[in-house]
Image (cartoon, rainbow, N blue to C red):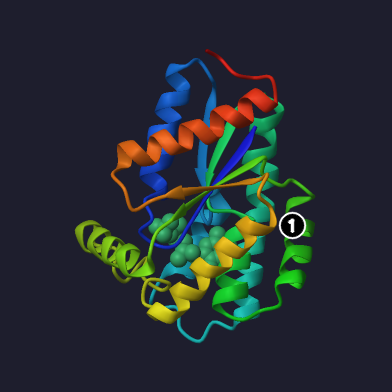
């Protein structure tokens, strides 16, 4: 089963991913945790370019195709093989990030973005997308603190440095997509503590596992 985490900066996706992976492994599932950009060796090089605040003047289309190159390689090298082995894949960001950031954030045509993404992923859409939702004011404060603590303000700060209105558009984009595909998306209230976020994620995942006849009690 293929599960993605989505949300604005500082929504707590990587913490939720880690806690959910532990939870599922304790239940006996084999789990593959990965992320975009940077889930494969080519992607790690692309990530350095894409997220570095010193990457200036990058055209929106060039940015898009770098994310898509990362995704196409990642699907072929990591995600599809793990799914073929029956693993549960937990991926931090995927296609919906492109539609939210490059589409709603940068203003590119969202139908075109879905079409080029579909080409990059070869039709491999997630079974479940956990949308960690919270107000951008809250997310940006959290993300800024994390980058300061980890010393990544410059090396990973290109998107954090976008305006609040940019991140507000991204959040609205995510919510619009979730409303359009209610069977795939679960909206998680990410403003609560990590344990509560985990509980919400677990209940959405268990519902999906039940649907697929793969639930372990
Ligand atoms: P990341 O470190 O994953 O962000 P976070 O810590 O918030 O999860 O950085 C990825 C950044 O790249 C994030 O700001 C969103 C952006 N992004 C896009 O604009 N388009 C995409 O397709 C992807 C995958 C990420």
Quadrant for the N terminus in the image = top right
- Whether residue 188 is visible to the viewer of this picture, yes or no, is yes
Check disc 1 and report the residue beneath it.
120
Q: Residue 106 placed where, x, y %? A: 57, 80
Query: Can see residue 46?
Result: no
Q: Quadrant of residue 137?
A: bottom left
At which x and y percent is residue 55? 45, 78
Q: Residue at x 70, y 38 (%)?
A: 80
Q: Using the image, determine if residue 152 lies above or below residue 61.
A: above
Q: Residues within 10 Å of mark 1 (few under 14, many from 20)?
A: many
In percent of the image, x 51 and y 59: which residue is there?
Answer: 45
In the image: residue 47, left or right of residue 141: right
Q: Position of residue 77 (x, y in %)?
A: 66, 42
Q: Is residue 92 left or right of residue 163?
A: right
Q: Secondary structure at mark 1?
A: helix
Q: Residue furthest left?
A: 149
**Image quadrant of residue 23?**
top left
Where is residue 191 drawn, in percent x and y?
33, 53
Question: Considering depth in this image, is 184 or 157 the residue closer to the camera?
Answer: 184
Q: How many marks?
A: 1
């Amino acid at each position: 089963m293929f599960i993605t985490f989505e949300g604005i900066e500082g929504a707590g996706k990587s913490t939720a991913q880690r806690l959910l992976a532990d939870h599922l492994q304790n239940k006996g599932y084999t789990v593959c945790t990965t992320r975009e950009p940077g889930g494969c060796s080519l992607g790690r090089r692309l990530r350095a370019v894409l997220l570095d605040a010193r990457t200036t003047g990058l055209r929106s289309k060039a940015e898009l195709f770098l994310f898509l190159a990362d995704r196409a390689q990642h699907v072929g090298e990591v995600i599809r093989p793990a799914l073929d082995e029956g693993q549960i894949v937990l991926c931090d960001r995927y296609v919906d990030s492109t539609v939210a950031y490059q589409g709603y954030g940068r203003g590119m045509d969202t139908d075109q973005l879905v079409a080029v993404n579909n080409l990059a992923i070869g039709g491999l859409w997630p079974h479940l997308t956990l949308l960690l939702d919270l107000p951008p004011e809250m997310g940006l404060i959290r993300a800024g603190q994390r980058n300061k603590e980890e010393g990544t303000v410059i090396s990973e700060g290109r998107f954090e440095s976008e305006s609040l209105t940019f991140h507000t558009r991204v959040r609205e984009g995510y919510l619009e997509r979730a409303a359009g595909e209610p069977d795939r998306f679960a909206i998680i209230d990410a403003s609560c503590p990590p344990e509560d976020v985990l509980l919400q994620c677990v209940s959405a995942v268990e519902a999906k596992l039940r649907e697929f006849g793969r639930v372990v009690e």
